[in-house]
Image (spheres, grey):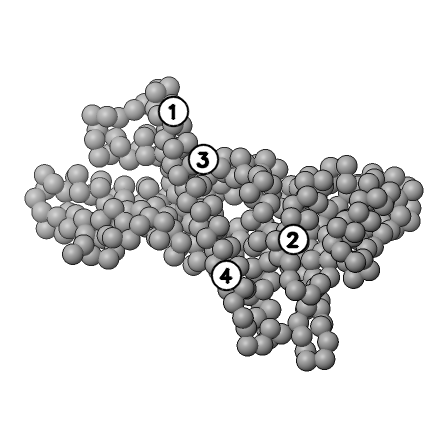
Amino acid sequence: MTRRHLSKSLKEVHGGLRDWVSQRPEWLQPPLFGALFIYAFVLWRGGIIILPLAFLGWVFGPASDRAFLGSLLLAALVYAPAAGFLGGLLFAGVRPLLKRLGAFGRYLEFIFGAWVYCVVLVFVIVPILKPADKVALASPAGWVISGIMAIVYGLAIGVTANDDKAKAQSSDANESAAPAHDPGCPAAVMRRSSALLGLFLGLLAARGLAAEALDAWRAWVVFKQFVRVAAEGSDPGVSVQIRHKRGSSEAKLFMLRQVVADDGESLEPVGGVVCELAFVDVPASLKEFEAWTFDHGTFEHFVDTVEQDPNFSLLIGRRPHRSDAYWEDA
């Protein structure tokens, strides 16, 4: 039977590495992931067997083999992971510029990250292993080949990452749907918060939207869908709020889906999923606004009240200069 380290899929290796890297400092995560992903790819391709044999051949083998085996070890253990690390740096560098493009920008991030590795592969690693195939840096063919490879590899990694994210969100949602012994306990609240926020982010991603670059009206459309999908037996509390200080040119629009826990006597709020949109250069006539589903017979009546408010109308057609979606404790 095939050994387990060779039977694992690249997706499984990717998922395990992602969990470890996510615990490192945020700025270090993309470069670390790039380097470790290359190591995992080498092992997944049987490197855990080939590389030790290559090392033994390099140490004890004839001189005629040492040059090739030494180059093989150098390429697999140094150059390739270093290219992955540099690709991660580029990935992190272009993210602020591409995040406003939504899902398309996310795929471009992976393509840029993969491009660094492909450049090193074409111009450095391949010539080491096969000197006859050496490509000059001035050769357009080498850059075209590396670009095509980057598109293929970048899209493949992007699809894998999005698939893993969707499965994680689905798993969180299933855990949330399962009955809990004490829905007010911290563990239960954490599961519900993670599942609900994951659901909202998943609905945004399905429409090609990123939480950091939302269009106000489309965010409102998705938020309404989110509330309907996450509906419970009793109304947990949904709110739309506008905050604007008199004389200020800035304003914030909040869309909140509250989460409550039963303490035996009443339903107490424990937190909620918040979609925040920040605007600049708003009209001086803008007034603060707050509406809750508690004050309306149905969610549809609540939506009508919100959409007919003139202050909401002033903001919903504008492009926010900043946006975010997050969980906020009560």
Q: Compared with residue 72, is residue 239 higher up or lower down, i.e. above or below? A: below
Q: Nearer the viewer, residue 44 or 83?
A: 44
Instruction: Estimate how packed mark 4 is, as few (under 14), some (14 to 19) or many (20 or more) residues with alpha carbons within 10 Å.
Output: few
Nearest-to-viewer mark from 2 and 4: 2
Q: Amino acid at mark 2?
A: Arg
Q: CA distance from mark 1 to mark 4?
A: 46 Å
Instruction: Estimate how packed mark 1 is, as few (under 14), some (14 to 19) or many (20 or more) residues with alpha carbons within 10 Å.
Output: some
Residue placed under numbered mark 2 in the picture: 228
Which tag, 1 or 2, sits closer to the chain's start?
A: 1
Nearest-to-viewer mark from 2 and 3: 2
Which tag, 2 or 4, sits closer to the chain's start?
A: 4
- The kind of secondary structure element at disc 3 is helix
Does residue 112 appear left or right of residue 43 in this picture?
right
- The kind of secondary structure element at disc 4 is helix
Which tag, 3 or 4, sits closer to the chain's start?
A: 3
Q: Quadrant of residue 100?
A: top right
Does residue 63 appear in this view? yes
Nearest-to-viewer mark from 3 and 1: 3
* Quadrant placement of the C terminus: bottom right
Residue placed under numbered mark 3 in the picture: 111
Nearest-to-viewer mark from 1 and 2: 2
Does residue 142 appear left or right of residue 27 in this picture?
left
Q: CA distance from mark 2 to mark 3?
A: 36 Å
Q: CA distance from mark 1 to mark 2?
A: 49 Å
Q: Are marks 2 and 3 in contact (CB under 8 Å)?
A: no
Residue placed under numbered mark 1 in the picture: 143
- The kind of secondary structure element at disc 2 is helix
Residue placed under numbered mark 4 in the picture: 174
Q: CA distance from mark 2 to mark 4?
A: 17 Å
Q: Amino acid at mark 4?
A: Asn
Which tag, 2 or 3, sits closer to the chain's start?
A: 3
Instruction: Estimate how packed mark 3 is, as few (under 14), some (14 to 19) or many (20 or more) residues with alpha carbons within 10 Å.
Output: many
